[in-house]
Amino acid sequence: MKVYIFCLMVFLSANLSQSQKLEYTTVSIADSLKQNANAVVRLDRTDIAISSQRNMEVSYLRAVTVFNEKGMDAIKAYANYDKRTSVNSIQATVYDGSGNEIKKIRRKDFRDQCVLDGVTLFSDNRVIYLDYTPTQFPFTVVYECDFSTSNTAFIPTWYPLLNYLTSVEKSTLTVTFPEDLGFKKKEANFGKFQITNTSNTSKKLSYTAVNIPAQKEESYSPEYYECFPKVLLGLEYFNLEGVDGNAKSWREFGQWYAEKILAGTTVLPEETKAKISALVGNEKEPIKKAKIVYRYVQQKSRYVSIQVGIGGFKPMPAKDVDRLGYGDCKALTNYTKALLEAVGVPSYNTILYGGREKRDIESDFVSIQGNHMILSVPDGDRYIWLECTSQDAPFGYQANFTDDRNVLVIKPTGGEIVHTTIYQNHDNFQMGKGQFSINENGDLVGDIAMVSEGSQYGSKSNIENKLPTEKEQYYKDYWSNIANLKIGKIAFSNDKEKVAFTENLSLSAANYAAISGKTMMIVPNAYNRFGGIKRIRNRKTPFEIQRGFHDVDEIAIVLPAGFLVESLPKDFEIKTKYGEYKTTLVKNDNGNLTYNRSLLVKSGRYANTEYEDYRLFMEQVSRNDNAKIILTRNQ
């Protein structure tokens, strides 16, 4: 019997050891989770314990198997901390593909640095992160972190799936909270995922998500937060920056934020107020005053990148920005507001999600949201929106970063959800007018002027700040359809009052036209050719055109002497729900040609089943953009 028990213990011990070894082997990952995956999240456990209005503890355990370099972003082993947030423990263990431990990383081995090195203002805002360089793939990192904070206004959102091309074996969320703090949640995008609400009581909430296969990011796919599952979490009674507050409604939240967080931050030195008053002079019109102040801020200050919620929620005092000449988005917004106050112009701090991808403040869930701050200046029944971090943006210009989204305007009377400027399809306009000539060898010499407005202004206006070599490379990439391209004159005109950016260029290219025997073929659309879009079979996600645009081109073409026109591309026109396209090619009395082209692409979100129709529309555009004039040499 003793021998039997001993053998049994040895057997169980061996199996236990083997099971521990197998826990993070790649062999144990289901094939369905390996498909399309750069990484697999083996376990993502988030435990949030809210003990009072002024105390929250968060514990993370995240085990990620990484298959290749592209999967490194899925590790997410970092933590931010400051004087109100403490990292109590942090560690990581690395395993090889067979599940063998190869490295244990203690806190002292993590990188610990200021969020923004070189800016002492933010020395209390730090990040601690894992800086690990793998020696082989695949490998697994098990990351554990516990932190505590008095900022209960910002409860982490639960995203069981955080990346495209990353699959998830298991992700759990557990939140415990007192009954009297008005805990609330909002679920979204659960539909096609295996997510179970395992507990939902007056003191506890928990979810489990399992076996989520990697999602492929298709062309024109919405951002992950638009289509992946998530749970927003919040409290009606919270603490922010040491101040108790409430978020029962946007009005109450905004009033509290204005009175408790923003109060006292717009004090300026008397000499600065005198200076800005002298600059404004006798101007009475509020918006003209605002333009003067905005230019002053652009010339005086520079931006340092600290997101809302990381560099603190309370803006740096305006007097400090005035003294130092720099600040983050909150600081520069607040500084501009202080200067406007000094000359009698009202304005309001505005919280939003900034970024090229449009993202709304979720208006049906009152909570701290957003990653950016701008300034809103009332102008009758509308607002003018000021991006105070930019040193060169035109007054009130928003396209490509803060346009067309719900934002929270903080007024002394309370918060208000407002939608920012929408740049319509026709607003995003580019007019190209130019000419080119072709000689008997097929060489091209030409020039063109392109005027861009709306979102296209924002995409082009930064070109003038590039180095000469960068400008040349930009246009070689822009006109990649022209082989042997040489750029001559480059000149710009930036009209910030009209918000119009003009590019004037001269260029040449040897052998632009194709010659075969006595035949020469010329593509009349030399300057604005569309290359088509990718075919996607069995598309899964809806597709979105976030910003429509309208391009119009008028190009004069001088044909080579000694050649006769054999055939011209036929005029073409198509109208669909996704856009409109039209081209004409007219032979003038002097024997030369005028090419006209118009392309309108409409913004919108469309069903996955419509993608092929859109692709076919753009394929017709591409095909006609590449249509050719055929000439024959005159004997």
Image (tube, grey):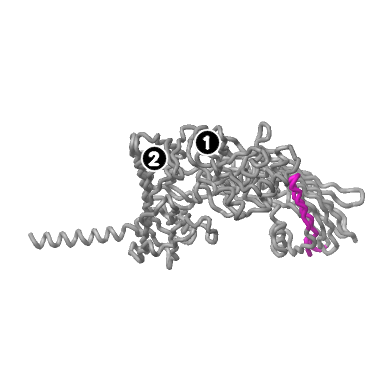
**In the image, 435: left or right of 581?**
right
Q: Which mark is residue 254?
A: 1
**Looking at the image, which residue sits at the far bottom?**
135
Vertical relation: 603 (above or below) 81: above
| Res 49 → quadrant | top left
Which residue sits at x=75%, y=50%? 501
Q: Which mark is residue 53?
A: 2
**Looking at the image, which residue sits at the far left?**
1
Q: Is residue 111 visible?
A: yes
**Looking at the image, which residue sits at the far front?**
270
Q: Quadrant of the C terminus?
A: bottom right
Magenta stretch contains residue 7:
no
Q: Which mark is residue 182?
A: none
Residue 352 in percent (x, y) is at 56, 42
Mark 1 lies on a secondary structure that is helix
Q: Is residue 192 visible?
A: no
Residue 194 in percent (x, y) is at 39, 42
Magenta stretch contains residue 508:
yes
Which residue sits at x=59%, y=49%? 319
**In the image, 239: left or right of 509?**
left
**In the image, 82: left or right of 433?**
left
Q: Main secondary structure of the magenta part?
A: strand
Kind of residue at badge 1: Gly
Kind of residue at badge 2: Gln
**In the image, 505: left or right of 364?**
right
| Res 609 → quadrant | top right
Question: Which numbered disc flags the more N-terminal residue, 2 or 1?
Answer: 2
Residue 226 in percent (x, y) is at 52, 42
